Image (tube, rainbow, N blue to C red):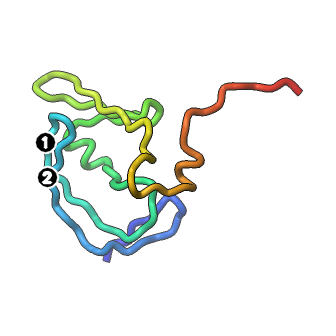
Amino acid sequence: MLTIQGFNQLGKKFMGTIALQMEIRDLYLDALFHVIDADTSYNVLLGRPWLHTYTVVPSTLHQCFKYLVDGEVKNVSADMDPFMGVEVNYSDAKFYGAPSLSFTQP
């Protein structure tokens, strides 16, 4: 059985797999997902095999990814207000946001 290790270094046994057809703007593709039962602040992790298969270039710093469709570069940006939905995890929302750029002198 496959164990998926999380960011907290604890392993979770997966419950099963599901193949889904995905649509991200004008990028249409198939992906196989491993399903786990875990409280997370994200819905899905797209790994290196997926990125390489669909020639996607992610940027954590810029919170976006880019891909090619018919030779044209497309960009998908992160949701700038991801905690407006029904399922809001307060602890995640509390620490999310633009960093403060104010400095105080001692």
Q: Are marks 1 and 2 in contact (CB under 8 Å)?
A: yes
Identified at 35% across, 55% down, the residue is 43
Identified at 25% across, 72% down, the residue is 16
Q: Residues within 10 Å of mark 2 (few under 14, many from 20)?
A: few
Residue 78 percent coordinates (x, y): 38, 37
Q: Quarter of the image containing the N terminus?
A: bottom left
Q: CA distance from mark 1 to mark 2?
A: 7 Å
Identified at 17% across, 44% down, the residue is 23
Q: Is residue 49 above or below residue 102?
A: below
Q: Is residue 7 above or below residue 28?
A: below
Q: Residue furthest left?
A: 70
Q: Which mark is residue 65?
A: none
Residue 4 percent coordinates (x, y): 39, 66
Of pointers 1 and 2, the one earlier in the residue sequence: 2
Q: Residue furthest bottom?
A: 1
Residue 76 percent coordinates (x, y): 30, 32
Circle 2 — which element? strand
Identified at 41% across, 58% down, the residue is 87
Circle 1 — which element? strand
Left or right placement of residue 45 versus residue 32 in this view: right
The residue labelled by disc 2 is 21
Residue 61 percent coordinates (x, y): 47, 32
> Foreground residue, 90 or 76?
90
Q: Amino acid at mark 1?
A: Tyr
Q: Quarter of the image containing the C terminus?
A: top right
> Foreground residue, 52 or 37?
37
Q: Amino acid at mark 2?
A: Gln
Q: Which mark is residue 28?
A: 1
> Foreground residue, 105 or 81?
81
Left or right placement of residue 98 versus residue 24 in this view: right
Q: Residues within 10 Å of mark 1 (few under 14, many from 20)?
A: few
